[in-house]
Amino acid sequence: MREAWVVGAASNRFGKMKETGREAATRVAFEAIRQSGLEPKDIGYTFVSNCFGLTEKQGHVGPLINGGLGIPEVPSCTIESACSSSSAGLHEAFVHVAGGFLDAALVVGVEKLSHLDTLSATSYFAEAADYPFETKNGATFPGLYATLASAYQQAFPMKPEVLGSVAIKNHANAARNPHAHFQKEISMDTYLRSPMIASPLRLYDCCPFSDGAAAVVVAAKEFVKHPVTEPLVVRASARAGSITEMQDRPDLLGLPASRAAADTAFRQAHLERRQIDFLEVHDCFTIAELLALEDMGFVPRGTAGTAEVDGVTARDGKLPVNPSGGLKAKGHPVSATGASQVVEIFEQFNGLAKGREVPRTDTALAHNVGATGGSCSVHIFSRR
Amino acid sequence: MTATWALACPRCGRAALLEAPLGERGTVVAFTVLSVPGDEFLNDAPYAYVVVELDGGGRVTGWMPSIKSEGDLAIGARVHFVPGYKPGVQFARDADAPVPR
């Protein structure tokens, strides 16, 4: 197996895009390639993710993006894994590059939802759930994570302020991230007064519907030779699956796929949890950040809330979590999210995360969940 | 009711599945009360989405139109199937509706 590097990573500002998904995807891909010092013709394959492209009446977007980059002859395909789509694309890029099948690959994730109203967007999101067992019984994504939150609260009673502390931290980080959808801090009072969406989750427990695009260039160490940026060495690229439906899970405390993907990733990387400097985790809802920290073994089950309240996960804490603002406040343009987590790590490693730097940037982990845990990706990166 | 959406057990992988009747009553193990529904439940909110451990074994998910706020239900509450007015599995609290014998 060859050593694979992330040599370029770019994102637009999440929120509301005027341009189409395809245009935004092409733009961030061009920027990521430019940043890498490679040429578009060096790309051997483009892995695109665009779950809701059909709402823009556009499928098969890969060749269109490649055409816009001047490389229409390069093969492409679309990778769908719900909210973990572009980290699944990153995994494919890694496998092909590390395995020697490609020298360089492009990963692009893009989503545009702002042309839909909240009802349509909520309904499209729900399509990633189990239709007969979940959606037909009234579940939505906030509803499903709220159900997990209710089981968690039953086992580990906590005040609303605990989930609030996650929202406040991630908003504070996003306020310093020019890519973020919400660039404003919130107070506990604002959090507590926000309306209940699906008990116990309030509006400010939920990530927004965002438009956005992010791209990552993966290349073999031996192909790059003289990198023009500080590359991220891909130390682990792991994927896992698990039972998705609530009624079939052995327990409702956490997401089994997160546990499995993290265990595999740490075995691949030959690293211990304590050696990771900071994390980008899948906080589509505040409760999901607690579950992620516990599932991946960074804190014991039932204690993530205390870690959050005590500031362990703050930008200047012992283990910074979501310095980008996370899905919660940076935004969650479904198919762009996994790639955008890598953009944050790339910017932190390259000194580009101005105003939101974390203290140590030698290793980092990205955790990206598909739906309510049917899929999960965990990537671990380090410096050369 | 029957639920045969799998050809093998998602927990153990065995394909030797048997059809078994489910109990009509059970206990809530997790729930949420939704204020913002999807399009198929637009006129039903607020309502509860529930995970129920059935008497005699087996878990199912369902919904409860009679639950209008978080305080109307608790984990551990006793519920039972009721005929639904739309597709989906509908429950009611034992305290609110006749319990099947």
Image (tube, rainbow, N blue to C red):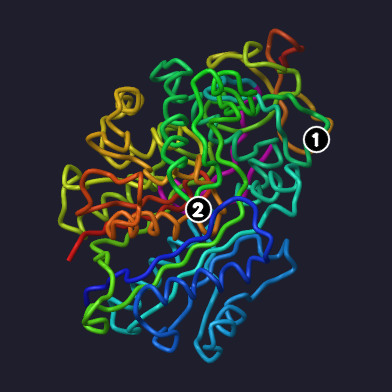
Q: Position of residue B73 (x, y in %)?
A: 62, 14
Residue type at numbered disc 2: Ala
Q: Position of residue A38 (x, y in %)?
A: 36, 82
Work out whether A351 lies above or below A307. below
The residue at the point 28 percent across, 60 percent down is A350
Q: Are marks 2 and 1 on the same chain?
A: yes
- Residues shaded magenta: B1-24
Q: Is residue A206 left or right of residue A178?
A: right
The quarter in which the C terminus of chain A is drawn is: bottom left
Pointer 1 residue:
B42
Q: Nearer the viewer, residue B73 or A231?
A: A231
Q: Is residue A23 left or right of residue A92?
A: right
Determine which of the numbered discs, if any, sits on residue A364 in the image: none
The residue at the point 29 percent across, 39 percent down is A320
- Give SS at disc 2: loop
Q: How many other residues sit within 10 Å of disc 2, few (<14), some (14-19) or many (≥20)? A: few
The quarter in which the N terminus of chain A is drawn is: bottom left
